[in-house]
Amino acid sequence: MNNHRIQSEAELIAMLAPLAVGAPGAYGLRDDCARLTPRPGYDLVLKTDPVRAGVHFFPDDPPDAIGWKALAVNVSDLAAKGSDPLAYLMALSFPAPPTHGWMAAFARGLAEAQSAFGCHLIGGDTDRAPGPLTIAITVLGEVPEGRMIRRGTARAGDAIYVSGTLGDSGLGLQLRSEARNLSRDLRNRWNLTDYQTDYFIGRYLRPQPRIDLAHTIRQHASAAMDISDGLVKDLARMCAASGVAAIVDSGLIEWSPSMMIVIRQQPELFSKILSAGDDYEILATVPTDQLAAFERQLALAPTPMHRIGTIIDVSGVAASNVTVTRIDGTEISFDRTGWDHF
Amino acid sequence: MNNHRIQSEAELIAMLAPLAVGAPGAYGLRDDCARLTPRPGYDLVLKTDPVRAGVHFFPDDPPDAIGWKALAVNVSDLAAKGSDPLAYLMALSFPAPPTHGWMAAFARGLAEAQSAFGCHLIGGDTDRAPGPLTIAITVLGEVPEGRMIRRGTARAGDAIYVSGTLGDSGLGLQLRSEARNLSRDLRNRWNLTDYQTDYFIGRYLRPQPRIDLAHTIRQHASAAMDISDGLVKDLARMCAASGVAAIVDSGLIEWSPSMMIVIRQQPELFSKILSAGDDYEILATVPTDQLAAFERQLALAPTPMHRIGTIIDVSGVAASNVTVTRIDGTEISFDRTGWDHF
């Protein structure tokens, strides 16, 4: 790594300018504002989700992973709304000037992410300020007019689907944390191989927004959102916004092969995994008359989605609006339903 | 002030939701993303400029002024590009939960600002994180397609104009700073009345983006930007981006009546005032064939603009691309040309 420290805003902008190539409205990051010419017949979908060192990532995480994640967590929301990423603005706040090597790796991670997701950096801002390194991205996507999929539009009878596998990133966070402390307690307890450990940590460091599912979601889902604070908590939010309740059969939830190994050894982790954050999978509800077409479309996407439950009327449940059952039909209770930001 | 502390993200969102009334794509701030349906034939103009306690404002500034300023500094960029504000997203980071009273006043300041500027809150994010209170706004404006005024398009022969008056906010910052320290040194040295002191501090606390000039700028200016880091520094940036140089006659710069009182007593402050930050006035260049029409339009806007100099060829100057002369034609030199963020 080049340890020369970035001296000026101009030097920093020069390192980020390649991320704006291909976006004419970015003006090479050399104007005060960016321009975006919207496509006729399309709505814009917008999201801002800043990430901070010590809260959303470790300060010593690989800088390319930090860049990737900063964009990925925002694009994940767009995909869950059925929209395609277009562009983003990024405000950086550094407590101390980064090294040239750090910035180069950070920009490389962003370049990989925006190339994978199909969007460009069009503008931003840089400050030196006390406090943690902060990357505040605002992302813009597009969706055919009136077709953004909402959170609060799930209806009783709809099937509940979840993409990919859950909990991997939550475990990755724990494994990354113990690796930073030069400990191997969890690795040893679960007899994890290097491959399995790297898999979990990779899911934490480089979340994969499910952009390949965006079109399927917007064609067939009644409601959708990304899971960033844990399945149970986010499903409860969807139910609250929709005025419905949900029943989830935990036996239908898909686990990664590495996660299966952990759950077999420590089954009591189960409820913790369902309330772990940072999944960045898509939670969607699909009306019964759309199920056949939805499943046909799913077969064409690289990322699988699995049906895990059903939306029901609110009158059908008493205490909570999300009920998770074991394979034997008994109910699982949660000490903590998910990640809370406040 | 109500000293009850905000307990949850939901409580905080409830206090901000009134700011989203009137923007259907905000979904009452209860969805994961916002939607914006662009007007056909218009480009979007975008800017993000976060403000942080201890850097851009004092932590104990009135919360309504903090809210106002957070939006105003972003809208100022839009106005200078000739665009009209539409909507904004806002990410808040609190080191500790704010009180209900603080949040109510903060939201009131934002409400006043968005009502004055003609835009709505459509989405955002809230976190608790160590570090200074941060308000990261991304604002979107609109401009007829292809009509955004750039920074790098000034040409030799163009007249240089500046809106309003310069330096008031820079002095306001000093007076606000000494008031926090229970000192009156500057007030006493300059014999400032309460009215004059309040005027300067008001310019610092509540900058007025020059949205009334946006249409005139986009019809007649060849280049424009807002002055946030000092006239000399920002004009030098415009010249560098345009490949030109500038000559400014300091005798043509307009001062507020309160500033005249200070300058008469302490003329050596002059060069400091020209390099003070936080002006949020518009700097624009106007081609000679547009001057008559530009001046006619200016007569209709509440905010005046004054011609202060002329753009010249780069070959015309040696050391620097901005030359500021005294009334007698001699050149003013600057220890520090303006505010640096990095």
Image (tube, coloured by chain):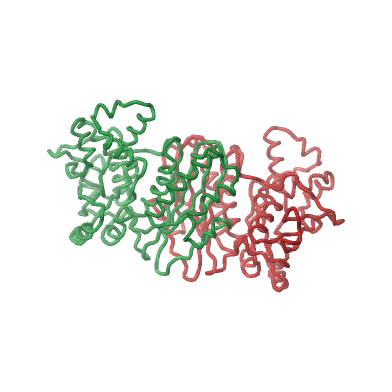
Chain colours: A green, B red
Q: Is residue A264 above or below residue B62?
A: above
Residue placed furthest toward the right: B328
x and y, in percent, of residue B214 in the image? 62, 64
- Asked if residue B121 can be seen in this view, the reply is no
Identify the residue shown where x is 73% and y is 67%.
B157
Residue situated in front as seen by the camera: B57 or A137: A137
x and y, in percent, of residue B230 in the image? 69, 50
Is residue B248 shown left or right of residue B30? right
The image quadrant that residue A178 belongs to is top left
x and y, in percent, of residue A26 in the image? 52, 59
Q: How many marks?
A: 0
Is residue B105 shown left or right of residue B179? left
Residue situated in front as seen by the camera: A273 or A300: A300
Is residue A43 shown left or right of residue B265? left
Which of the image's four quarters has the C terminus of chain A? top left
Q: Is residue A314 above or below residue A140?
A: above
x and y, in percent, of residue B173 in the image? 68, 42
The image quadrant that residue B218 belongs to is bottom right
- Asked if residue B106 can be seen in this view, the reply is yes
The image quadrant that residue B336 belongs to is top right
Identify the residue shown where x is 31% and y is 43%.
A279
Residue placed furthest toward the left: A328
Residue situated in front as seen by the camera: A273 or B302: A273
Is residue B42 shown left or right of residue B192? left
